[in-house]
Image: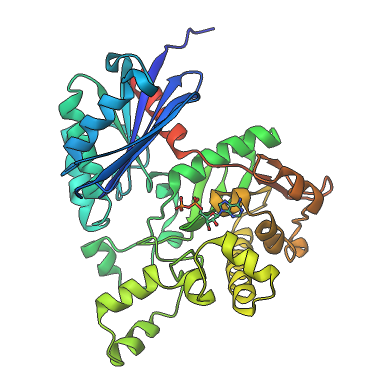
Amino acid sequence: MPILKRGKILVINCGSSSLKYEIFNMPQKDSLGKGLIERIGEKQATISQKNINCEIERTFYCPNHKTAMSKMLELIEEPTCRIISNLSEITSIGHRVVHGGEEYSESVIINSKVIKAIEENIELAPLHNPANLTGIKVAMEFFPKVRQVAVFDTAFHQTMPPSAYLYGLPYEFYEKFKIRRYGFHGTSHRYVSTVALDIIRRYAENTNMISCHLGNGASITAIEKGKSIDTSMGFTPLEGLVMGTRSGDIDPAIIFFLAERGYSLEDINTILNKKSGLLGLSEISNDLRDLEQKAEENNEKAIQALEVYAYRIRKYIGSYAANLVKLDALIFTGGIGANGVRMRERICRKLENIGIFMDYEKNREIGSKSGVVSCDYSPITIVVVPTNEELQIAIDTYELTL
Ligand code: ADP
């Protein structure tokens, strides 16, 4: 048996005004603690950090990401509620990066070429890649000798064939502007599909799955023999499922219709990304829990929003099932997929005709845990798996650097 090297991996997810971090003890995969900094760039930022024994929260002046990371490093080893005793214990660092374009189909050790590629993909992810890049550059300043890894949201979907990633647009737009389906949530789909295989005791090589990541953002992926062959988010995360506040698929002509009625492009962008989905339909909330509560009280808009949400998911499951030679498992994850017992039931109630039989009692019993929720006789197994993108980033970083 080879001796596995030990390491402590710092995982960083840097957003434009936030920084999430977590440290994992490898190869055991134990989380030692994690934290979140919010409102970077504002006068009063907050940092909260917890480990298995304690939790702390503080406010501090944080003009930029460098100050944020410096505060994070201070707290990680501060005796009050530390995660590790000394920063020198950190063996490598993994970064979440949203867009790897067509260049990256796997996680990579960061060097100047990788940094250039992330920069070049800024035009494809203008809100995320710059922040991810800032996180990388600042971490490199603080840890010049520690190897750092980029884990891309898009990488898992790079195995899609052209038939799935090309749009029915003039081909020159793909060549000139790289307009194609990229897909997102790849790290989550990859993680939950690996865990699901363990749960159902099967190998990737002979298993086809559909994984539903249903959070505030939501996407669904068809996985054939361990590889993504189609996914519902596209050129941007706006396409596909009805989400918390995003519309998902609409007839593109609606945009011209609204523009002709005086809505600016900026208005339409805000409407489609922030005012649509469950929030727009229900006129109540983007939060599933609020809507389930209202639906219990027979609120018609809430009931309708939940039905539209579930219908779109079934529509995608049906279309992906038709494109896989055989479907073996359906996975639910994300805040809604992993916790929304009633939503899982709502989605599966009409899937029996394609061989997906939910055991409603098991579904209720499993609640927010991981496990199988289909009937024993169901040809397709339904599995619930809480996602853990940070752990997947730590695993990739460990495998590439130690
Ligand atoms: P994000 O995409 O922001 O990471 P999450 O994956 O945390 O989002 O999912 C947020 C969604 O999960 C919300 O709609 C929330 O209502 C839902 N959710 C969280 N916990 C539960 C629960 N116990 N039951 C039902 N829905 C839940």
Extreme residue toward the right, this view: 377
**Which of the 4 image quadrants contains residue 111?**
top left
Nearer to the camera, 72 or 113 = 72
Nearer to the camera, 179 or 295 = 295
Q: How is the image coloured?
A: rainbow
> What percent of the width, then of the height, locates residue 12?
32, 35
Q: Is residue 345 above or below residue 284?
A: above
Image-based side of 15 in relation to 221, left or right: left
Image-based side of 71 in relation to 318, left or right: left
> What percent of the width, then of the height, locates residue 88?
27, 14
**Which of the 4 image quadrants contains residue 135?**
top left
Q: Residue at x 26, y 23 (%)?
A: 147
Q: Which corner quadrant holds the N terminus?
A: top right
Extreme residue toward the bottom, this view: 261
Q: Which corner quadrant holds the C terminus?
A: top left
Q: Is residue 240 above or below residue 61?
A: below
Image-based side of 70 in relation to 157, left or right: left
Q: Residue at x 45, y 76 (%)?
A: 250
Residue 29 visible in the displayed image: yes
Q: Residue at x 44, y 19 (%)?
A: 25
> What percent of the width, then of the height, locates residue 131?
23, 47
Residue 82 visible in the displayed image: no
Nearer to the camera, 138 or 54 = 54
> What percent of the width, then of the height, locates residue 30?
50, 23
Marker count (numbered): 0
**Which of the 4 image quadrants contains residue 21?**
top left
Q: Is residue 317 above or below residue 300?
A: above
